[in-house]
Every structure is written in C-alpha cells, then in structure tokens.
Image: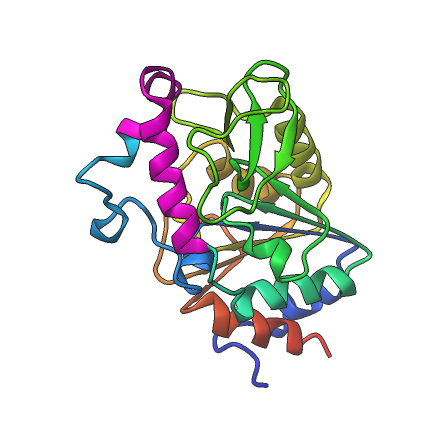
C-alpha cells in the first residue's frame, strides 16, 4: 500500500517512534460508513431541526417525541459497518505502546471496528441512562420495544448522549486532556475542528511539543497549526498511513 501523497518521512518516523499516540475523530469518519450527519437534509426527521430535539428541555417536554427520533436514528445506524478508517485506527492501537482514541461520534462504529482504548466525548446512541439513578446500560433493540423505554426501577431512560446545553462528562474530559498533554503524536481525523473543547486539542498538543497530523476532506481552522495535513478520505489515507509504518 502506498504512502499517502504529501506525507514526509519525518512525520512517518515520528509516528513510528511515538511512545504515546492519540487519535481524535469526528463526523467525517462516520460519514464514510454512511452515517448521516443529522445536520444536513439527510438528517431531517418530520421536518424537525435536530437542535430542537437534542436538548434536555425537549426531553422533559415530550420524551416520547425525542425517543421516536432516536429510535429512527438507531434504525439508520444499526445496519452500518466500520469502514477502513475505523479498522486502521484499531490496528494503530495494537501497534502503539500507549494509545487512546477520543471520538466525538456517538454511533458505536469504533467499538464495532475493534477499538478498545477509547473515550466517547458525546456519549453513545446505544447506551441509555436512568433519569433517577443515573445508571448507564447498553440497549441495542431496533426498533425499541417500548417508547419511552423504562428502567427496572420504574423511572424513565434517556439516551446517554451529551445534548445541546449540557456539559461533557467531567471525568471523560479530564482523561482526554491528560492524554492530549502527554501524547507524542496526535492524529485529527474527519473533524471540522470548530466544536469545543475538542477543537482546542490540536493546539494544546502542538504547544506541548507533540507532532500533529490532520486527515480531512478539506482545510480546517487547524490546518495552519498542525505539522502536516492530508486531504482526502480517512478510509483511504489512514490505512496507507498505518501500512507505511512497516
């Protein structure tokens, strides 16, 4: 498999020698598996704006409506499979002495693709959380047997997703920041680098002396900050990158 065009031997050597590797992924990686962005026309459901439904206020007002939307989304995602980018990231994990994947994606495809050392910044659409006790469990029913689903304690379950207006899990954020500060090499793949706090991760890593490689379809706000950028499909470029390590 050829080395990605435009990638220097210096960058490949830095990745090969890195003691701690972190990969940050965004919606672009999922899109190559067919996951709708839910921000464009393909993500519309009953003409609702996702930002009207993915909020605590919407859930408190009409949990059945919100769950019907999530049930629809889960149905779209369920048959999808990891693409070569997911598989390459899982392979890179096996090759790295210390590795962490930080993903903004909620579809669960990284886990399906073999990634183990992973933090999901925005939650996971296949996890549900009890609104009373806070317990998180997996639920892969498609379609859901009951809407809204209920916890064994009798309370309602909600999607274990970070909604608009909610803060990230402080423990997950802390772990992410620690990994960014400690890494030697950061790969940023399939993200527009505008959503905070993850948009700041490449800048933090560079300031700490890490080598930062961007893989995206087009230039982003961090393109002028990173050591190197590769423009194209992550599903093509990441397998080439891993193969170039030998």
Magenta portion: prevailing SS class: helix
- Horizontal arrangement in the rendering, residue 105 relative to residue 68 (left or right): right
**Residue 135 horizontal/vertical position (percent):** 65, 24
Q: Residue at x 71, y 46 (%)?
A: 183
Q: Identify whether 245 is placed above or below 118.
A: below
Q: Quadrant of the C terminus?
A: bottom right
**Residue 92 horizontal/vertical position (percent):** 69, 64
Q: Which residues are magenta?
A: 52-77
Reply yes or no: does residue 130 show up in magenta: no
Reply yes or no: does residue 56 show up in magenta: yes
**Who is closer to the viewer here, 221 or 67?**
67
Q: Quadrant of the N terminus?
A: bottom right
Q: Residue at x 54, y 66 (%)?
A: 85
- Horizontal arrangement in the rendering, residue 70 relative to residue 161 (left or right): left
Quadrant of the rendered image containing residue 180: top right
Q: Identify whether 76 is placed above or below 85.
A: above
């Amino acid at each position: 498999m050829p080395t990605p065009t435009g990638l220097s031997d210096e960058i490949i050597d830095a990745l090969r020698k890195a003691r701690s590797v972190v990969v940050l992924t965004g919606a672009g990686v999922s899109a190559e598996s067919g996951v709708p962005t839910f921000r464009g026309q393909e993500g519309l459901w009953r003409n609702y704006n996702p930002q009207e439904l993915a909020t605590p206020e919407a859930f408190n007002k009409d949990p059945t409506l919100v769950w019907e939307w999530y049930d629809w989304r889960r149905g779209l995602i369920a048959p999808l499979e990891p693409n070569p980018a997911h598989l390459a990231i899982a392979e890179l994990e096996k090759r790295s002495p210390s590795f962490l994947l930080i993903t903004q994606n909620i579809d669960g495809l990284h886990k399906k693709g073999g990634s183990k050392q992973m933090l999901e910044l925005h939650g996971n659409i296949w996890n549900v959380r009890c609104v009373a006790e806070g317990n998180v469990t997996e639920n892969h029913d498609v379609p859901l047997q009951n809407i809204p689903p209920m916890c064994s304690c009798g309370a309602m379950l909600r999607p274990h997703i970070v909604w608009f207006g909610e803060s990230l899990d402080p423990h997950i954020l802390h772990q992410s920041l620690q990994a960014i500060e400690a890494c030697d090499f950061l790969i940023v793949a399939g993200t527009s680098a505008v959503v905070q706090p993850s948009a700041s991760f490449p800048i933090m890593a560079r300031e700490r002396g890490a080598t930062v490689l961007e893989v995206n379809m087009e230039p982003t706000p961090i393109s002028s900050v990173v050591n190197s950028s590769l423009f194209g499909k992550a599903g093509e470029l990441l397998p080439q990158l891993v193969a170039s390590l030998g």
